[in-house]
Structure formats: C-alpha cells, structure tokens
C-alpha cells in the first residue's frame, strides 16, 4: 500500500508547517497539500483526493463546520478535527463528529510552541481513520421502535463500549430505547477530559431515557444511562439495595481510562447472566477481554458489524476472541437488546 495522503486545512501558517513536519517525519504518511480557507479546502479535496483531511474548526470566512458539511457532500473523506478551541467548544466538536468527522485532537491541550508534542496522537489518529468510513448522524429521536419477539426479562444492565466513531453510534443506539426501558445502561466512550460531560448532555437531548455523565455513587437504575467520565474507570459497587457506580483512577495499568474491559469485567462479576455487553465502532481491542467474561458468566454479547462501523477494531477483536453471540448492524442492535429485556 502507498502512503496515507493528508490534506492539511488550517488558517495558521505555524500549524500548517508543524503538521507538514510531523507527517514528513512519519513513515507511511505524506502531506498531499495544504489549504488556509474552507473554499480552498473543498477545491483540493476534489482535485487531490486525499485519504485524510485534518481540519481546523475556527477559520475566517467558511468555518470548519461549514467546510466539513461541504466535504461530506462533495467527496466524503475521513476527517480529523484539530482546533485550539475544541476544549471549551466541546459542543462544536461533537457537532463536527455528528456531521461526519471521524475523530479529533484538542490542540489547546498544549502550548502552540509545544505543538509537536501532539505528533504521536495526530499520527496515530490519522493512521487509524485512513480507509475508515465517515458516518453522518441524523436526528433519530426515540419513538416507534420495533421490538423483535424474544425471551424477555433477561437483562438488568446493558454495558456499552465505543471509541472512534462512537458518539454517533451511541446516539443511534440510545435514542432507540423507549423511556420505560426495563434495564440500566452503562457506557464507556474513549474521549479526553472535558468532552464526556457535553457528550452525555447531547445524547440526553436526543433520547427518551435519561443520559448523564456518571458521578461516584450514582444508582444503577432502569431507564437511565450513565457515561463514564474521561480519566476515571467505572465499575459496579454494592449499594444497600440498588447497585451503584464507582469511579476510580485504579487500576492504572490499562491503556485507556476509562477502560471498556474494566467496566465489562465488573458488570460480569455483579450481574452475571443478566448482563448484556455491546461493543460498538472503535480502534484497538479494549473490551474484548471483558466481553469474554460477560459471555462466560452467561450474559448476552453483541458486536456492531463491519459494514456499519467507522472503525471495526474493537468489535473485530472480540469476535476473534469468540466472545460475541451476535454480530449486528448498528440499526438493529437496540431491537435485539429490547427483545431480551
């Protein structure tokens, strides 16, 4: 395979030069071109046909959001958002993910003169999304969900793990649950600090069930979805009568914090055969080990299929581990879970 060709779109000449240096120093990646405006970016996406676009949100004239919309209309391409405003503009970043951007890097997390410190993260994410499938979200608010005939009454908790492409997959899944759903939902989405709270609030606006960022001690109750905060693992602890979530930086040996494996393992230990484990789109293998534990305890396990995944890494890892009962397109996962609830 040839090099991954990246189009760099940013109004800052410093950032454009820094990204060129990063890609020139990275085997297998090359800068296919640069653009300083949205209009120029659209022209070069069409003429250069890059494999990946890095796109700043804040640009003069046509901003990054409008540019992203045009790219997805003219030539859908994997897009990595970069902006020094995404940390305080998390809602805007989530909007970009909804419009088809596959991932983002918060370049405000480091000083401009230390921008090259982000090189490893940028290269990793460019490599991951190259060849991926941009997925644009739709307003799919809950209602009229067709529930497949099934056994019923078998699930007390649905544990969900996701990474790259996860925010839109979560919106599709969770918005299909009716308000009176008879199980609780626990979610781990790989994201940097500052973004899981806005993600939970955005999901809540689309869903009939309540969605919130988890706080230590929150009750795990039917009809409510708790999203693990970035930087902390989420596990199940004992309450007087109702189980509660526990949040902790431990264990510290996991690649991701929060970790899907940590959540799934805890859910398996507490709920046993009355748990469902669901792995959605994402890079890497987090969740495969924990899903095996859910399956071994008699729980029901589901993996999103490759055709509907932005990145098939996490589902594939669980499938290869023989930890998956059903492989299902994203649009069919909710009905399958509800059929067992």
Image: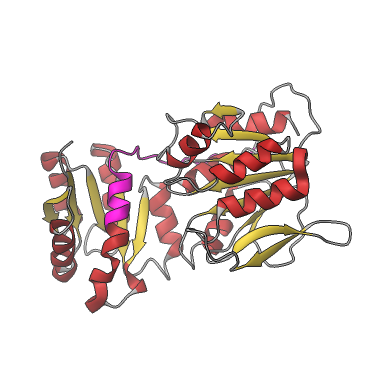
**Residue at position x 69%, y 52% in the image:** 266
What is the span of residues highlighted in magenta in the rendered image? 123-142
Q: Position of residue 173 (x, y in %)?
A: 58, 40
Relative horizontal placement of residue 324, taking residue 268 as reference (left or right):
left
Q: Nearer the viewer, residue 214 or 92?
A: 214
| Residue 307, x across and y down, in percent | 42, 29
Pick the front one: 131 or 27: 27
Left or right: residue 232 versus residue 191 is right
Residue 125: within the magenta? yes
Instruction: Find out whether residue 198 is within the magenta segment.
Output: no
Quadrant in which the N terminus appears? top left
Q: Residue at x 66, y 26 (%)?
A: 146
Q: Quadrant of residue 294?
A: top right
Q: Position of residue 223 (x, y in %)?
A: 74, 47
Q: Is residue 292 above or below residue 204?
A: above
Q: Determine the image quadrant of residue 274.
A: top right
Residue 203 visible? The answer is no
Q: Residue furthest top?
A: 149
Q: Nearer the viewer, residue 238 or 329?
A: 238
Residue 151: x %, y % from top left: 78, 25
């Amino acid at each position: 395979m040839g090099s991954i060709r990246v189009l760099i779109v940013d109004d800052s000449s410093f950032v454009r030069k820094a990204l060129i240096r990063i890609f020139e120093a990275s085997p297998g990646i090359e800068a296919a071109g640069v653009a300083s405006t949205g209009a120029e970016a659209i022209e070069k996406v069409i003429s250069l046909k890059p494999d990946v676009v890095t796109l700043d949100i804040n640009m003069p004239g046509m901003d990054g959001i409008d540019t992203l919309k045009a790219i997805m209309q003219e030539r859908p391409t994997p897009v990595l958002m970069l902006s020094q405003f995404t940390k305080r503009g998390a809602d805007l970043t989530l909007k970009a993910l909804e419009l088809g951007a596959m991932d983002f890097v918060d370049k405000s997390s480091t000083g401009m003169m230390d921008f090259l410190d982000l090189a490893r993260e940028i290269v990793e994410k460019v490599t991951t999304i190259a060849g991926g499938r941009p997925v644009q979200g739709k307003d799919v608010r809950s209602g009229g969900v067709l529930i497949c005939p099934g056994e019923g009454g078998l699930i007390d908790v649905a544990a969900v793990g996701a990474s790259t492409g996860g925010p839109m997959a979560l919106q599709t899944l969770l918005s299909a649950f009716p308000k009176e759903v008879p199980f609780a939902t626990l979610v781990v989405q790989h994201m940097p600090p500052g973004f899981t709270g806005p993600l939970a609030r955005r999901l809540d606006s689309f869903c009939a069930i309540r969605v919130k960022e988890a706080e230590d001690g929150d009750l795990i109750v039917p009809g409510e979805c708790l999203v693990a905060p970035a930087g902390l693992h989420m596990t199940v602890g004992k309450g007087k009568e109702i189980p509660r979530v526990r949040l902790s930086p431990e264990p510290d040996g996991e690649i991701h914090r929060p970790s899907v494996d940590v959540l799934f393992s805890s859910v398996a230990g507490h709920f046993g055969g009355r748990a469902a484990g669901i792995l959605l789109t994402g890079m890497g293998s987090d969740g495969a080990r924990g899903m095996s534990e859910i399956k071994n305890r008699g729980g029901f396990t589901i993996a999103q299929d490759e055709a509907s995944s932005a990145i098939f890494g996490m589902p594939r890892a669980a499938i290869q581990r023989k930890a998956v009962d059903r492989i299902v397109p994203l649009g069919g996962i909710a009905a399958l879970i509800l059929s067992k609830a």
